[in-house]
Amino acid sequence: MKKIKNLIVGCGLSGLVLAERIASQLKENVLIIDRRSHIGGNVFDYKDIKTGITIHKYGPHVFHTDMKHVWDYLSNFTQWHFFHLETQVVIEGIKTALPFNLNTLRDVFCPSLAERLEQKLIETYGFGTKIPILKLKENGDNDLRFLAEYIYNNVFAGYTGKQWGLRPEEIDPEVTARVPVYISRDNGYFQDKYQGIPLKGYTGMCKKMLDNPLIELKLNTDFADIKNEIFPERLIFSGAIDEFFEYKYGELPYRSLRFDIRTENIEYYQKTAVTNYPNNYDFTRICEHKHFLNEKSNKTVISVEYPQPFEIGKNERCYPINNPQTQKLYQQYQKEARKLKNVYFIGRLGDYKYYNMDICINRALEFFKTIKGENK
Ligand code: UDP
């Protein structure tokens, strides 16, 4: 039996922020563990030896935030490659901009129809606004209803079917609202003030966060294997909350992904980093990694994303499936969690929430404030 000050389970963004803050601000020792063989959780990237291209192992990660303090915080550990993601989507054989915007409208419809729909959209919602597809579908105007049906069928129905195994109405409306119809000519996937990719990759940034003699890192280490040997004064758990409680109320479901990572003997595979295929194939999107850091090679590396259900021990948890039943189940676990003293749950898996990277970091920074308060 070994007593320690802080144990952090999970070396993804949440765990890393807390390890870094506790070590640098409270000057306390931290042991951070991860069952995987690498740091960074699902933001982990690595250099492909043959091409020198940085690969986002778990799919495209583009950092974007409107929170200056989050951007500034990460800027302590990395310089940035300024990068604005433009995603393409294949609609009826045409490669065009996503989110569906006024440029997309012109690409897929004849000029007179595009003009009429554009006018109606601007009159109804105003230029520069974002309308979730399920909201647009509620519009009673014939033209706008036609447009909503078109976008629903060509952008959302097929993709959501593959990604979640469900129809868009059957998933949390906030999920499809992440990619709203945008009444604008801006082809950017995000409009946040701060956008970029860590210049030395996410793994480089994460390494810097751990660069403190008070932090000890143990990879290939499962919490279940050490929990009876190590007694922390404070346990921060960023793994799956249902697993922590040995699934006593049942499993919280997730969607997972399989990545088919391929080297192609051509300089570029596609125009932008990400292309979505809502209606073709069994995969959802193809990511071409060299775009992220504008890396040069006469070859290229792509990853093809196949969604699949999460299965314990077989693949990784990627997306929590938020609906009334899973929320009820999560709340049962949350109630158990509240009974524990000095044990805290954070992150996508600990909170069972579809966090973006910036939200995850902000949540960890806010949580650190509560720890700091307790230490006073
Ligand atoms: N979505 C869609 N078609 C697309 C892109 C997204 O139907 O071409 C829907 C789908 O349900 C997806 C959600 O919007 O799960 C959120 O997409 P986002 O690109 O934000 O997903 P992430 O990058 O987090 O996987």
Image (spheres, helix red, strand yellow):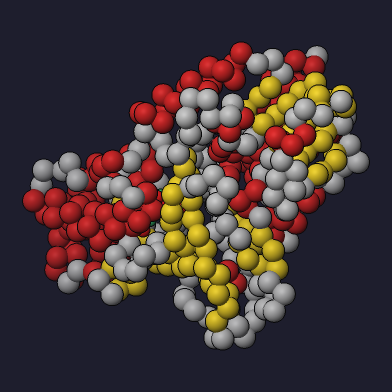
Residue at 48% of width from left, 47% of height from top?
A: 310
* Residue in the foreground of this view, choosing between 260 and 223: 223
The residue positioned farthest toward the right in the image shown: 213
Rendered position, 126 above or below 349:
below
* Any part of residue 234 in sight: yes
Residue at 40% of width from left, 64% of height from top?
A: 283
* Residue in the foreground of this view, choosing between 200 and 15: 15
Rendered position, 169 above or below 371:
below
List x then y, in percent, for residue 198.
Answer: 68, 57
Rendered position, 136 above or below 185:
above
Quadrant of the snapshot with the N terminus = top right
List x then y, in percent, for residue 232.
Answer: 80, 24
* Residue in the foreground of this view, choosing between 245 and 259: 245
Quadrant of the snapshot with the C terminus = top right
Give the quarter of the image for residue 104.
bottom left
* Any part of residue 76 in sight: no
List x then y, in percent, for residue 367.
Answer: 66, 26
Would residue 146 appear left or right of 270 to someone viewing this image? left
